[in-house]
Image: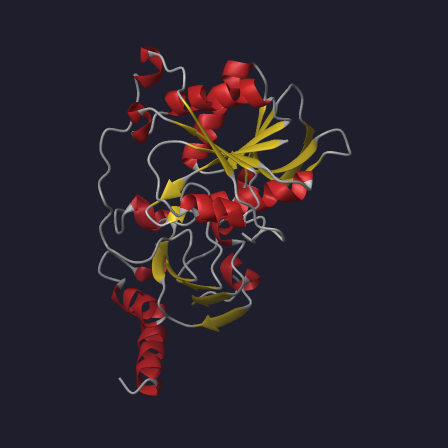
Amino acid sequence: MILVLVETAEGGLTPLSQQALTWARGVAGDAPQAVVVGDHPATVRDQLGAQGVSVVHHPEDARLDRFSASAWASALADVVAAEQPDLVVAAGTPRGTEVLAHLAARLDVPMAAGCVSLSVSDGWTATRQVMGGAALEDLRLAGSPRVATVAAHVVPATPAASPSQPDVRRFTPSLSDADLVAQVVTLEPGTGGGADLAGARVVVGGGRGAGGPDGFADLLELAELLGGTLGVSRVVTSQGWRPHHEQVGQTGTKIAPDLYVACGISGAIQHMAGCQSAKTILAINTDPDAPMVTRADYAVIGDMHKVLPAVNAEIKARRGA
């Protein structure tokens, strides 16, 4: 049996947790169980049912409403002790990775982070991303249970062939004061608006070619016209031109949009690690030999500050704006 730690947001299950559930079904071929920690929307049970989840474990303790990796791991460990799963999985988010690292340490078993596939018939052999996704590594998971996180966007989130009515099992977790030493006290909303970067269908990216903090107006306009959001390269955030939450890459957000328009971005390895799951990449760059251009599906060779205004004008003209 596979046990999946899922994360929730205002709208219910996060997209990456839905992907992790889909991935888990593919590994085991049967219904996974899920753990939901903290306060969550009422829609979560139905969403878990759509993913074919058989049992939902929900620790009830108001102290878990604030995220604490150690406390969440303690609650998860209680479920592991009761259910004896073969594998414990979470999405490879900062939160999922931290909680499972705590769990693995408590259980004295290794943790495989960033897995893309796992073969049970071959002795629990996992393939995971290393070097920011530039290479793959095969390893055998030892110990019991096996503990692993799932790399983002390795499978699309798809509903189960047979939806379920999950059995919800509530319990009181065994938390200690030590579990709550470090916890999230407040959450502040980000600035700048736009769609969630990880789940955006269209991302318009800007890099060094923007030229400075005032060089993003055309990018933002294109993102708005396409119903997408802005993403940037590491050099942009390092220079302080844009906030870090907009960064795409190994040290930022990994994206999988239908369309990624990369403007003035050279395409360094760490950036490509963040956008390699994009279905279509359109690069706009003055350098025809830039890695982003050579890896793109389509490319426009030119100055983004000349190309983008023309593109935006044409879109508005066709819409009669």
Residue placed most toward the observer, 64 or 184: 64
111 lies above or below 280: above
Q: Residue furthest right?
A: 122
Q: Position of residue 119 (x, y in %)?
A: 72, 37
In the displayed structure, 185 sits above or below 285; it is above
On screen, 8 above or below 107?
Answer: below
Quadrant assignment for the N terminus: top right
Q: Which residue does the image show at 35% across and 39% down from the upper left?
A: 40
| Residue 129 pos. (x, y %) | 59, 39
Quick check: 108 above or below 226? above
Do we see residue 270 in this rendering? no
* Quarter in which the C terminus is drawn: bottom left
How was the colour assigned to the protein in this rendering?
A: secondary structure
Along the line of sight, the residue nearer the viewer: 125 or 278: 125
Circle count: 0
Which residue is painted at 48% across and 54% down in the image? 267
Nearer the observer, 113 or 54: 54
Residue 8 shows up from this direction: yes
Q: Residue at x 55, y 15 (%)?
A: 107
Tell me where residue 265 appears, x and y as whole percent: 42, 58
Residue appearing at x 23%, y 54% in the figure: 192
* Residue 3 place in picture, x, y as percent: 56, 31
